[in-house]
Image: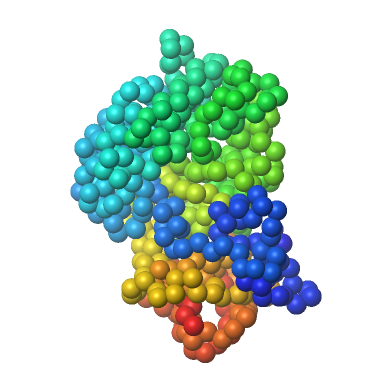
Amino acid sequence: MPAGVARSGFRPPATGRCRLPAHGAALLLLLASGRTACAGEPPPVAGTEAFLDSLGVVSAVSRRGERLDRTAEALGFLGLRWVRSGYESGVPVGDLLELHRRTGVRFSYGLLSGGNDLDRLLTGARKLAEAGALLALEGNNEPNNWPVTYQGRRGGGTNSWVPVALLQRDLYRAVKADPVLRRFPVWTVSEPGAQTDNAGLQYLTIPPGADTLLPAGTRFADFANVHNYIYHSAAPRLEDNKTWKAADPSPACPVDGLHKNFGRTWLKGFAGYPPQALERLPRVTTETGVTVGGDVDEETHGWHLLTMYLAQFKRGWRHTAVYLLRDRTDEPGNQRFGFYRPDYTPRPAAWYLHRLTGLLQPAGPAASDPRSRPPAYRLDPMPPTVHDLLLHRPDGVWILILWNERVHGTDRVTVRFDRTHSHIRVHDPMSEPTLLQTFSRTSQLVLDLDRHPRLLGITD
């Protein structure tokens, strides 16, 4: 993406370059319409609520060593809005409803690993929907690792993926035929890039001429679902722009991302969407994260998770679930993924996210003019590791988030606004206290950006 400037008609100097809008969903709308942020009118700006709604986590809630009361406490502390769940592990729907009652979180409710009981899934989903606790319905979890048996045939793994595709097709049909559930989105299976035969799961709807085993017009989902973990055999090292690259929807993404599952499948190379269509494809991430170990100490782990949520939202992902809320204690292997250790003590990642979500909460009542003009700004220079996200808080404060995905060192950046602002408060969610600086009646400020994100609270 070009570096440089550009918000709300603020014209950069001749050497400046145009910035696309800060929010991914707005970017998708502009791309679909053929417009850019340089069209002379303000681009759409997301509210802080949209960003907060994108923040999710994977949790077994009350199973696999987790306790419902501690799960509720952890979710409330982090400020997370949704949980990836399903009937896998025997999590009772009643526990999900109680967790929603205590915290307000919603659930993506899915078949998950090896599940094939559509009636059970739909029955549980209806109960969640009626309580206001349902976010979406999800297909199978990684059928390459957990095969599925459907209609007497085993699919996934090294077998044909046609049974997986038929189950996903029937899930979609059942949801859209259900008077309670039809308004909720359906998410695809994860890891369709592992298809051994061209069942067509790399599409939301199979287009004409796709040469897939299921016919053109077969509908699978409303959103693509990806597990774009930031460390991968093709990107194994700690490096600059780690989470930014993993969120890239294009073929340039080095990890198991959108392109390798819905553009050209990573195992067999079956064709899916072209790059331009991937940019506009509705998408979610139901697993991403990083384990603590090696070059990734707990501070780096927390930094990654914070920038992960920011990069995902900026690059157009509607919802992102980090793996994992609390370290797993019921399975072998390295399980140091969590915001929380097995004894529920918080890692630095938990404190960082707690401060970030707290800073995005309104400090007062809703603004009398909720559509006030957003600040136009430019960043000079615009290093390739520096990224920005402009959000509007309900109380009228504009929040400009700047983060630098440089592993070592700093970049000095001048933020130039098109007008003078009454107050600008600079916060760092990775520090305590978070408030670093306060500026009054200013139209520019200079920041030395290390890898700690900065939140600029801007008021006129």
288 left or right of 247 in image: left
Residue 452 seen: no
Q: Which residue is drawn at 78% across and 74% down?
A: 15
Q: Which residue is drawn at 74% across and 72% down?
A: 16
In the orientation shown, which residue stands out farthest toward the bottom?
441
Q: Is residue 355 above or below residue 150?
A: below
Q: Position of residue 376 (x, y in %)?
A: 60, 75
Q: In this view, does 38 lie above or below 331?
A: below
Residue nearer the viewer, 280 or 387: 280
In the orientation shown, which residue stands out farthest toward the front?
179
307 left or right of 323 in image: right
400 left or right of 418 in image: left
Residue nearer the viewer, 137 or 328: 137
- Count the marks: how many? 0
Name which quarter of the figure residue 431 lies in.
bottom left
396 left or right of 273 in image: left
User: How are the residues colored?
Assistant: rainbow
Residue 414 seen: yes
Q: Position of residue 333 (x, y in %)?
A: 40, 36
Q: Residue at x 47, y 68 (%)?
A: 392
Name which quarter of the figure residue 302 lies in.
bottom left
Q: Position of residue 332 (x, y in %)?
A: 37, 34
Q: Which residue is drawn at 22% across and 51% down?
A: 102
Q: In which quarter of the image is the N terminus?
A: bottom right
Q: Where is residue 342 in the image (x, y as percent from the top left)?
A: 29, 46
Residue nearer the viewer, 267 or 455: 455
